[in-house]
Structures are given as structure tokens and as C-alpha cells.
Amino acid sequence: MLAWVYLMGAIGLEVIGTVSLKFSNGFTDLKFSVLTLVMYGLSFWVLALTLKVLPISTAYAVWSGLGTAAVAIIGLVFFKEPMTALKGVFLLMIIGGVVGLKAISSES
């Protein structure tokens, strides 16, 4: 169970890194550029810790899927990006896939 907690932490760090990437203005803003690199580095480190327990296929799919969905939702809410019905359906498919992977996964 601790591996899943680590995985959620890795996802959070990756999301912070991605949002910081937007604010880095093409790596021209030093503080957000450094924050981006630090958050991505920490995210990969924590993801690597989860791979000691979780299968790579499950861990990476959950990490990338939930990170993608979270960043898309942040884009919609905070950056006023447009939402279409298809975008909503595909976001729900990503989240559903992650839930399904969690439901069938077994820690090894």
C-alpha cells in the first residue's frame, strides 16, 4: 500500500513540475525553470521507489495517466482552456483506465 502512496506523491510532483513548466516561459524565468527541473527529478526518484514494489506496466501507466488527467483539469479550471464533450469523454476514459489498472493490479 505504501507504494501507491509514493506513486500518488510522484504524480503530484510531476503535476507541479508541468505547471511550473508553463510558468517558466520557455525556460526564460529562472525560478520556474529550476522548480520544473527539481519537481521532475523528485517525481522520477519517487516513481523509481514505487518500481521496487509495483510492476512497471501498472506504475508508469498510472503515473502518466493520472498526471495527464490532472494537468488537463488544471488547464481547464485555472488556465481557462476550452472543454469539449469529446475532451471530457477522453479524460474520463483515462481516469477509468487508471481505476481499472489499480483494481486488477497485484503488488509483487
Image (spheres, helix red, strand yellow):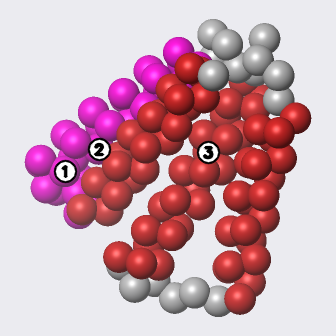
- Mark 3 to mark 1: distance in Å? 22 Å
- Report the disc number at residue 64: 3
- Report the disc number at residue 32: 1
Q: Residue at x 65, y 50 (%)?
A: 65
- Quick check: 79 above or below 43? below
Find out whether the residues at labels 1 and 2 contact each other: C-beta distance under 8 Å.
yes
**Residue 48 within the segment the image draws in magenta:** yes
The extreme left residue here reads 30
**Whole-percent x, y for residue 80 in the image:** 40, 85
Comparing labels 2 and 3, the label whose residue is closer to the camera: 3
Question: From which residue to which does the magenta span run?
Answer: 24-50
| Callout 3 secondary element | helix
Quarter residue 107 falls in: top right
- Report the disc number at residue 74: none
Q: Is residue 106 left or right of residue 26?
A: right
- Mark 2 to mark 3: distance in Å? 16 Å
Comparing labels 3 and 1, the label whose residue is closer to the camera: 3
- Quick check: 4 above or below 65? above
> Which is more toward the observer, 98 or 14?
98
> Which is more toward the observer, 16 or 8?
8
- Report the disc number at residue 36: 2
Circle 1 packing at 10 Å, graded few (<14), some (14-19), many (20+), is: many
| Callout 2 secondary element | helix
Amino acid type, label 1: Phe
Q: Residue at x 75, y 77 (%)?
A: 89
- Quick check: 96 above or below 41? below
Circle 2 packing at 10 Å, graded few (<14), some (14-19), many (20+), is: many
Position of the N terminus, as image quadrant, is top right
Amino acid type, label 2: Thr
Amino acid type, label 3: Ser
